[in-house]
Structures are given as structure tokens and as C-alpha cells.
């Protein structure tokens, strides 16, 4: 996620040039530069807009992914943090989770946290 106008626009235009599909929740960017972005994407990639939830996480339904249930998984957007003693690393990405795993059943506006402590 990146807010604002110019940096976000340049990042998206570069991604389009490299053949990458775009999912954004940046309303301000599309209001200011939507015409240019859609023109650059025309017949090359998809530009998808989704509302943001939880202060900036795009809803993955825009990606129209339905195959996950066929394999017994559910796609969830996970935030993962790791402390290695000197640094804290963090990332957010879509992940396929088995449907019987507790986090797979957290939906809508609800969030869940799972901690693993290594001593």
C-alpha cells in the first residue's frame, strides 16, 4: 500500500509497463491520475479497485480467486512479524490456509492474532 499521488502513480505505471496487474485502494490516486493509469493499462493488464479495510489492507475479493476451496484452502491476507534479537521484520501477503485452521474462519471486519514464542 502506498498513499499519495506522484510516487504511487510512478510505481503503478512502472508495474503496468512490466505487465503486472494492479489492485489499489488509493482513491486519491485514481481521482487525480486515473485516466493516465487506465490508458497505460488498456489491453495489457487489469486495474482493480477495492475498498480498504483495517486502515489500508485491500480486500482480496477483487482478484476473483475461487480455486482455493477446490483444494481445501482459503486465501487470507496475513501480516507476519518476526523478531530475531536485533531486528523486527514484518510483511503482509496473501496466503493459502487450510480451511480447518482456526485463522481460516476469521472473516469480515474481524481480525485474529496468533503468537508463537520461541524461548
Image (cartoon, rainbow, N blue to C red):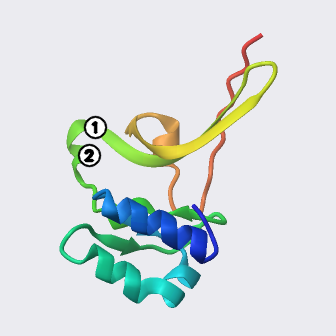
In-front residue for pair 92/18 = 18
Q: Quadrant of the N terminus?
A: bottom right
Q: Residue furthest top?
A: 119
Can you identify the residue that label 1 sits on? 72
**Residue at 43% in and 85% down:** 34
Q: Is residue 16 above or below residue 4?
A: above
In-front residue for pair 29/105 = 29
| Rendering coords of residue 71 (x, y %) | 23, 37
Q: Quadrant of residue 13?
A: bottom left
Q: Is residue 117 above or below residue 100?
A: above
| Rendering coords of residue 54 (x, y %) | 64, 63
Q: Are marks 1 and 2 in contact (CB under 8 Å)?
A: yes
- Name the secondary structure under disc 1: loop
**Residue at 39% in and 84% down:** 36
Q: Residue furthest right?
A: 86
Q: Quadrant of residue 57?
A: bottom right
Can you identify the residue that label 2 sits on? 69
Q: Seen in the image, is 5 located left or right of residue 61?
A: right
| Rendering coords of residue 40 (x, y %) | 31, 76
Q: Seen in the image, is 9 located left or right of residue 86?
A: left
Amino acid at each position: 500500500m502506498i498513499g499519495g499521488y506522484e510516487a504511487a502513480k510512478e510505481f503503478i505505471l512502472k508495474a503496468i509497463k512490466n505487465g503486472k496487474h494492479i489492485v489499489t485502494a488509493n482513491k486519491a490516486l485514481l481521482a487525480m491520475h486515473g485516466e493516465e493509469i487506465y490508458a497505460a493499462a488498456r489491453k495489457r493488464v487489469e486495474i482493480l479497485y477495492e475498498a480498504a479495510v483495517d486502515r489500508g489492507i485491500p480486500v482480496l475479493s477483487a482478484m476473483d480467486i475461487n480455486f482455493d476451496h477446490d483444494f481445501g484452502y482459503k486465501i487470507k491476507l496475513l501480516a507476519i512479524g518476526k523478531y530475531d534479537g536485533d531486528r523486527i521484520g514484518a510483511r503482509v501477503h496473501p496466503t493459502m490456509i487450510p480451511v480447518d485452521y482456526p485463522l481460516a474462519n476469521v472473516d469480515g471486519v474481524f481480525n485474529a492474532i496468533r503468537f508463537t514464542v520461541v524461548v
